[in-house]
Image: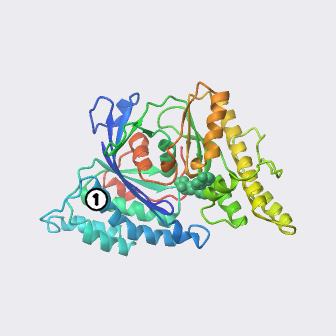
Amino acid sequence: MRILAIETSCDETAVAVAEFRNGRGQSRTYPRTNADKTIRVNVLSHLISSQVKIHAKFGGVVPNLARREHEKNLVPMLRSALTESHLLKKNPRAPANTSIHRCIEVEGILQREPELLRRFKKSIMPLTPPDIDAIAVTYGPGLAPALWVGVNFAHALAHLWNKPLIPVNHMAGHLFSAFLQKSGVKCLQPTTYNLPPIKFPLLALLVSGGHTELVLMQKRGIFKIIGETRDDAVGEAFDKVARILGLKYPGGPEIARLAEKGNPRAYALPRPMLHTKDYDFSFSGLKTAVLYLVRSLTQTKFGSVKKADIAAGFQAAAIEVLIKKTIRAAKEYKIKTLALGGGVAANALLRAALAAAIKKELPHVAFFIPDQTLCGDNALMIAVAAYFAGKKKSPEQAMSLRADANLRLG
Ligand code: KG4
Ligand code: ZN
């Protein structure tokens, strides 16, 4: 099965083409019958265009700027992805060959994205439909204006090429990214990953800029959020604390870098909701505690040593709560597999400390963690989630697909 995937939920435009083959070398079959086998993933293309520099001067993502950038990026990125995948073919008879009916439909689908429509007509309509089996797209959660560009683009492609569309939950993408294991074959083109069979129950700790969730999967395809943040997401708290400390956006990597030089025990910072019986989190109080601490210190002397200590203290507090609650949930639900995913999964302390806690307290649990390069938003994870958890919609059914900024797993 060959999937073209599109991701535009926030400030990364991403396009990927991935091919899924089951262990016996048969390709392009639908996965459900192969649930217990290792799947080989050939990544034909995996492109990400980050807008971080554009949003950095505003200290966070500006939704309409993100939308504009996605509109500009999608067509050239799709062409590059198809070229890399050896799937780009010009149709010598186009555009005459493309039915008037389909052209009119595409105009209707992209009427709110005039810039995208212009590029689409010029550079996508003259192509022969590529040899793919489905188009996957993130339809939520995320920033509505950004999501809509991707959804409409994917919808227009599905109509033009008469391919099924697979709507994907962004958080499912982060969850499944953990299972992409480097195949160990070096210098192999294209990049290949193995997707091992998953043992259930599975618990996933999903930590990103917009979400902090503990997701339980008792069996394949059934997601249940058993705990989540009541206020700020953990990535958001990293970003806000970074701003308080005068560090640049995005703050997560900046805090992590600074924390390496600091003493996490220099200041006593709270561990919100550590001992509550539920599996919810709260990070806004921790952020406020940092703010008050910084205010009290600036009245005296506030140098780089203190900054590093605060970064280390904040990071240690946030990670301790994440890990303790995850381990407790893992025990209660007697899970067999634990996965970590989302932008904050790139954090070296979180990765190491969670791995150590599992080794010590749950040695029989299989722990999966995404490659550092796959923690942030990307379209490969959307292709994988589409393969595992997606439901195909015909181009006609795709008509009813709506971006959903508040989409939840489950
Ligand atoms: O998943 P993601 O790329 O986008 C969303 O879906 O939100 O997550 C972005 C978040 C940002 O808040 C960023 O600061 C955080 O992930 N992040 C990190 C690290 N790298 C990225 N947080 C802590 N430590 C890191 N190394
Ligand atoms: Zn994300």
Tell me which amino acid carries mark 1: His
Q: Label 1: how many residues lie within 10 Å, few (<14), some (14-19) or many (20+)?
A: many
Q: Nearer the viewer, residue 141 or 399?
A: 141
Q: Which residue is mark 1?
A: 159
Q: Nearer the viewer, residue 129 or 105?
A: 129
Q: Is residue 286 above or below residue 93?
A: above
> In the figure, is residue 401 to the left or right of 257?
left
Q: Quadrant of residue 13?
A: bottom left
Question: How far from the left and from the top, in percent, is residue 264?
Answer: 76, 49
Task: Report ligand 1 position as a quadrant.
Answer: bottom right
**Residue at (66, 52) in percent of width and height:** 234
**Residue at (29, 66) in percent of width and height:** 106
Determine the secondary structure under disc 1: helix
Question: How far from the left and from the top, in percent, is residue 391?
Answer: 39, 44
Is residue 233 visible to us here? no
Q: Is residue 216 above or below residue 122?
A: above
**Residue at (49, 46) in percent of width and height:** 172
Question: How far from the left and from the top, in percent, is residue 64?
Answer: 51, 72
